[in-house]
Amino acid sequence: MANIEILGAARSTYVRAVRMVCEEKAIPYDLAPAAPHSPDVSAIHPFGKIPVMRHGDFELCESKAIATYLDLSFPGPKVFPTDPRQAALAEQWVSLVNTKMDGTLVRTYLSAYVFPKGADGKPDRNAIDAVMPAVAEQIGLIDRAVAAGGYLAGDSFTYADINLMPILFYLQKSPEGAAAIASTAHLSDYYQRLSQRPSFQNTMP
Ligand SMILES: N[C@@H](CCC(=O)N[C@@H](CS)C(=O)NCC(=O)O)C(=O)O
């Protein structure tokens, strides 16, 4: 059987998450650099988003679906728990991050730095200030979530953590995001601990 082929850009948080699954499970894979809406990507994802995956003649899009396929198809540590409650908690956190927090933390806050729209090509200070209450609220929510068990879903590392870590990586590199994480009681430790994992180190953008 052919290697797993992940199409996408290394800088994408969603691409990094599926690559981290490959690394955690020691799945051989190739990263084929591809931009959103490029022909190869749009042939697989109906809205042209990255990552997409090829495995032999099987093609798949959407990071969570790709992660599930990898977890079910390959040996190695499970990134989706089998215990019903822990599995549901992992799903819950993937959903919360992808449907709400990605919009606030990545598409609004971080994008203000990556795609500056202010005067003189600088980041739009008003846009950043406007989103900061929501950023602080969501950082606080994650901080409380990891307080008890040290992970998002109970007391073990799951795809919920994998899905979040690439976002925290960029937050750590932005002034207000780094300050917000540094001020937390638990999230700061969580980030430092999980960022030591080889799957995270081996997928640096
Ligand atoms: N729901 C998708 C989201 C993927 C996504 O938004 N990828 C971004 C890059 S991080 C992208 O392709 N953006 C281009 C666009 O939305 O047009 C997934 O989980 O794979």
Image (spheres, rainbow, N blue to C red):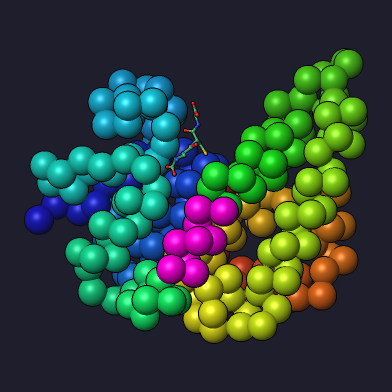
Total residue callouts: 0
Identified at 83% across, 29% down, the residue is: 127
Say if residue 136 shows up in the picture: yes
x, y percent for residue 115: 70, 26
x, y percent for residue 36: 44, 28
x, y percent for residue 95: 50, 53
Residue 158 is left or right of residue 7, and the answer is: right
Identified at 61% across, 83% down, the residue is: 149
Relative depth, front residue between 201 and 59: 59
Q: Is residue 94 magenta?
A: yes
Residue 92 is left or right of residue 33, and the answer is: right
Q: Is residue 24 magenta?
A: no
User: Secondary structure of the magenta portion, mostly?
Assistant: helix
Residue 176 is left or right of residue 103, and the answer is: right
Residue 88 is left or right of residue 57, and the answer is: right
Q: Is residue 120 above or below residue 86?
A: above
Quadrant for residue 18, please give it. Answer: bottom left
Q: Which residues are magenta?
A: 88-96
Q: Is residue 102 above or below residue 126?
A: below
Q: Is residue 74 above or below residue 41?
A: below
Quadrant for residue 76, please give it. Answer: bottom left
Identified at 62% across, 52% down, the residue is: 167
Toward the top, the furthest residue is: 120
Say if residue 178 shows up in the picture: no
Identified at 31% across, 59% down, the residue is: 68
Quarter occupied by the N terminus: bottom left
x, y percent for residue 158: 46, 71
